[in-house]
Amino acid sequence: MTQLFDLSGRTALVTGSARGIGFALAQGLGKAGARVVINGTKADTVDAAVSRLRDEGIDAQGRAFDVTDEAAVAAAFEAWDAAGVEVDILVNNAGIQFCKPLIELALADWQRVIDTNLTSAFIVAKEAARRMIDRHRGGKIINIGSLTSEGARATVAPYTAAKGGVKMLTRAMSAEWAAFDIQANAIGPGYILTDMNQALVDNASFDAWVKSSNPSQRWGKPEELVCTAVYLASPASSYVNGQIIYVDGGWLAVL
């Protein structure tokens, strides 16, 4: 049974993985046997993350590029082609948050969040899937959604729109690529303790709201997303396609 979850011989690219959820997912996939590729926008933080993984015995390498830059993404995949690096597993994790009421929101800020959280998943997945199809070996695409893939919260409209889009983009990928043995699924994290959420954790009223609204009465931890990612990246999920799995402590189960 355990061999169904073995990722040995696979290569996993995790975008936005120099820290936070992305790093935890890369670490978990690496421990399951995958060779992992770390990505971020800053070379020094990418290199530091790669070093941490190698210290743990994980086969890791890194490449810094902006996932919203189509030319940069294409150049990265071309470089991997030349080096014989074949991405079998893609985790579209890169994301940002921006809080402001809709009527005060500038178009540039809206677009920046949409581009980073949604459009980048399209750009990177297109390059990965093209190669998966050409190799005739299938592949795995895991998009990171959110509770806001399902419901809204005030002041985070672009994030909500982007993460709702991630859910539907995942279904579109499944509709087009399932015939090539590519499984495209998503994970919808609840409120997770990360650097990006630190300001919310430090806000006493928001922290109390998170804990009182969630049946588990606590924030989630990045490592609690790992087993779901390993499942969706592994042969165990070979007939699971176009789904979003919420890892939220039971949040969406209650009113």
Image (cartoon, rainbow, N blue to C red):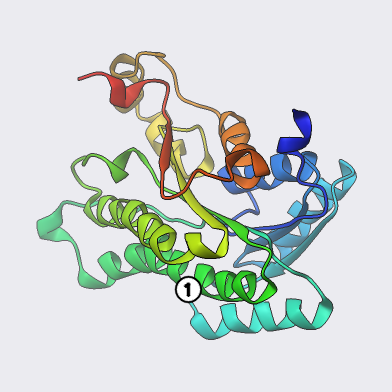
Q: Identify which residue, 55 or 118, lies in the foreground.
A: 118
Task: Give left or right: position of 124 versus 156.
Answer: right
Residue lying furthest left? 103
Asked if residue 170 is positioned above or below residue 71 in the image, the reply reads above
Asked if residue 165 is positioned above or below residue 84 in the image, the reply reads above
Q: What SS does tag 1 mark?
A: helix
Q: How many tags in the picture?
A: 1
Quadrant location of residue 218?
top left
Q: Is residue 141 visible?
A: yes
Q: Position of residue 219 (x, y in %)?
A: 45, 24
| Amino acid bearing label 1 | Ile
Residue at image position (30%, 57%) is 165
Task: Give left or right: position of 77 versus 10.
Answer: left
Task: Give left or right: position of 37 versus 111.
Answer: right
Residue at image position (37%, 20%) is 250
Quarter of the image where the C terminus is located: top left
Task: Give left or right: position of 127 versus 165.
Answer: right
Residue at image position (74%, 52%) is 49
Quarter of the image where the N terminus is located: top right
Asked if residue 95 is positioned above or below residue 230 in the image, the reply reads below
Residue for badge 1: 123
Q: Position of residue 207 (x, y in %)?
A: 36, 24
Residue lying furthest front? 179
Q: Identify which residue, 185 or 48, lies in the foreground.
A: 185
Q: Position of residue 116 (x, y in %)?
A: 42, 64
